Image: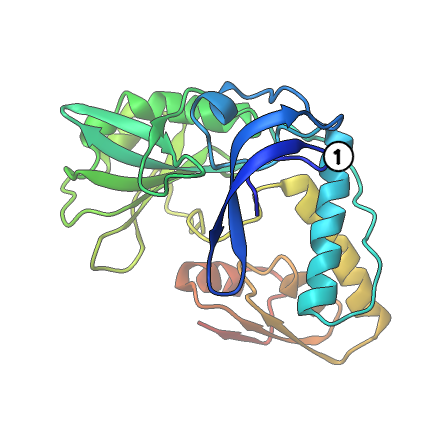
Amino acid sequence: FVPRTAPGDVARVAVGRAKRFARGQLLSLDESSPSRVEPPCPHYTADRCGGCQIQHLSYEAQLAAKGVIIGDALRRIGRRDVANPVVEPSDAPWRYRRKLTLHLRRSGERWIAGLHPYDDPVGVFDLVDCPITDERVMMVWGELRAAFDLLPHERALRVAVRLLDEGASVTVEGGHAWRTPETLLARVPAVTEVWWRPKDGPLRRVASRTSERHAGAAFVQVNAGVAARLRERLLARVRAYAPAHVIDAYAGTGATAAPLAADGRRVTAIELDRAAVETLRELPGKPAQGSP
């Protein structure tokens, strides 16, 4: 509740009260915690980037902090009498994100593409690099910057770049008219498909280099390695109970539902995203029931 502080800091803090809790603003740091480090990303300090929250802590302190956060949630919200869990270190603490969403704002004739400062939910700073994001995603963003003139002509947009098995997808949110989205494919060779969610319309694929169906705009965990470990853990727990019927809510594209259905179990997959549901229906060993 006091951003950019660390356990063990001696600091002056201004307290602002809300209805059920209080937040603090760091005014001055009188004595630094031994857990403090210099944040590796220059945006973290210079632009007060809100994309990360604890880069000013050593990695060991980050793991401990996450254990405290999870334990507190389980005890206070979940009402479970449990100790803080031990958080395992990641095999790749940097360059792991396979998707990066940036906010675009016009400044005169120039686009600014970046993230919000943690203390300014409206402002946007121009992002040069994001060291937690896969370099291939940053490469696509570099190519995309040279093609901003092909985006819907609006004052503000939200654009996401996501790695696919082959190439990358771009999802644009905002605007009322976009006449030639396919020209984006010609200008940015690394992009495989383009999705668009108009301001008053549904999300749809508007350009693609292939006729095959993808769900490049569907939700996906940004850390593929950690997501795979979690999924294997979940599948093992489910199989340990040997259920005949499994309900997979928030099924996405079927990463959990399809393996359980392939076991011979009856699986009901529930998902709001129609593109994800269509992809799920085409998987081998697909669930018995899909509910868009």
Question: How many marks are shown on the rendered structure?
Answer: 1
Determine whether 266 is above or below 194 in the image. below
Which residue is drawn at the image coordinates 74% and 65% (left, top)? Answer: 75
Left or right of 80? Residue 47 is left
Relative image position of residue 218 (x, y in whole percent): 46, 53
Left or right of 226? Residue 96 is left
Left or right of 44? Residue 181 is left
Which residue is drawn at the image coordinates 54% and 28% (left, top)? Answer: 28
Label 1 SS = helix
Q: Which amino acid does label 1 sit on?
A: Ala
Front-most of 65 and 226? 65
For mark 1, what is the residue? 61
Determine whether 126 is above or below 98 in the image. above
Which residue is drawn at the image coordinates 16% and 39% (left, top)? Answer: 154
Relative image position of residue 137 (x, y in whole percent): 48, 29
Confirm whether residue 133 shows in the render.
no
Determine whether 38 is above or below 61 in the image. above
